């Protein structure tokens, strides 16, 4: 994100976390046959789920290998039609204004380090959505009752400079792989309403991470104002 090197551009596809399941509430807000933008598609779980239900999907990721894995997964699931695959950064989407009926961001903002980039991304999503188009967002919430995360939030704060952020290490090398951020309800709600959206649905949830930890989470549906 921004002008700095993005660690997610070169990470191996198999190492990209993709544990959150798509909440069925999304289908109450997306009309049949809608054109959906899947931002940060990772290995394609969300894209495949949407395509299998008859939606037209454009899958965006900065990671070339992730896009290849999404394409391969789509083929193995015998989808009637394939998503359109586009390598792009979410801070500058290569689409015209009002191109999509809906957008999905599933555990994507958690790896966006900069507050400014998070706001840019939401504004970009707003730009490419049609009037009253909807954004489905699911992401991790701060989990202070967990000793594991409480210690990581506190110990890593001198490096991350943001409460709720922490360092994630490469299991093979022990080096820092990336920075992750867990949100508060206030953070996500204000991020949306300050950048062109109205919150229509909000739910607290519990997600399970790739390492098996249980983490607070939020599922939100917002519409373009």
Image (cartoon, rainbow, N blue to C red):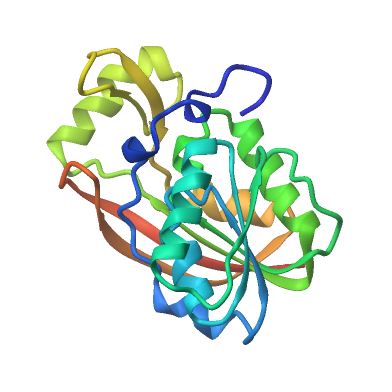
- Report whether 217 appears left or right of 201: left
Q: Residue at x 66, y 37 (%)?
A: 89
Res 172 visible: yes
The quarter of the displayed image where residue 82 is located: bottom right
- Report whether 53 appears left or right of 192: left
The quarter of the displayed image where residue 5 is located: top right
Question: Please, is residue 224 above or below residue 10 in the view?
Answer: below
- Front-lying residue, 72 or 54: 72
Res 108 visible: no
- Image coords of residue 46 (percent x, y): 45, 63
- Report whether 24 appears left or right of 192: left
Q: Residue at x 23, y 45 (%)?
A: 210
Q: Quadrant of the C terminus?
A: bottom right
- Image coords of residue 219 (percent x, y): 43, 64
Q: Residue at x 80, y 55 (%)?
A: 127
- Image coords of residue 172 (percent x, y): 21, 19
- Image coords of residue 169 (percent x, y): 27, 21
Q: Residue furthest right?
A: 97
- Front-lying residue, 167 or 186: 167
Q: Quadrant of the N terminus?
A: top right
- Give the number of callouts: 0
């Amino acid at each position: 994100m921004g002008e700095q090197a993005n660690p997610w551009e070169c990470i191996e596809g198999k190492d990209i976390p993709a544990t959150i399941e798509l909440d069925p509430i999304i289908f109450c807000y997306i009309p049949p046959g809608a054109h959906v933008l899947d931002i940060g598609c990772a290995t394609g779980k969300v894209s495949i789920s949407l395509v299998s239900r008859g939606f037209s999907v454009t899958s965006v990721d900065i990671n070339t290998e992730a896009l290849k894995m999404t394409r391969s997964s789509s083929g193995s699931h015998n989808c009637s039609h394939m998503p359109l695959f586009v390598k792009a950064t979410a801070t500058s989407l290569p689409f015209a204004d009002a191109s999509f009926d809906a957008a999905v961001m599933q555990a994507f903002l958690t790896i966006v380090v900069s507050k400014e980039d998070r706001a840019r991304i939401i504004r970009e999503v707003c730009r490419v959505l049609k009037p009253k188009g909807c954004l489905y967002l699911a992401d991790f919430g701060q989990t202070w009752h967990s000793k594991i995360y409480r210690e990581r939030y506190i110990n890593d704060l001198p490096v991350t400079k943001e409460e709720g952020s922490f360092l994630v290490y490469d299991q093979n090398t022990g080096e820092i792989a990336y920075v992750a951020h867990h949100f508060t309800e206030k953070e996500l709600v204000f991020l949306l309403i300050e950048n062109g959206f109205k919150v229509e649905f909000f739910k607290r949830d519990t997600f399970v991470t790739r390492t098996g930890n249980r983490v607070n989470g939020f599922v939100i549906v917002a519409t373009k104002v």
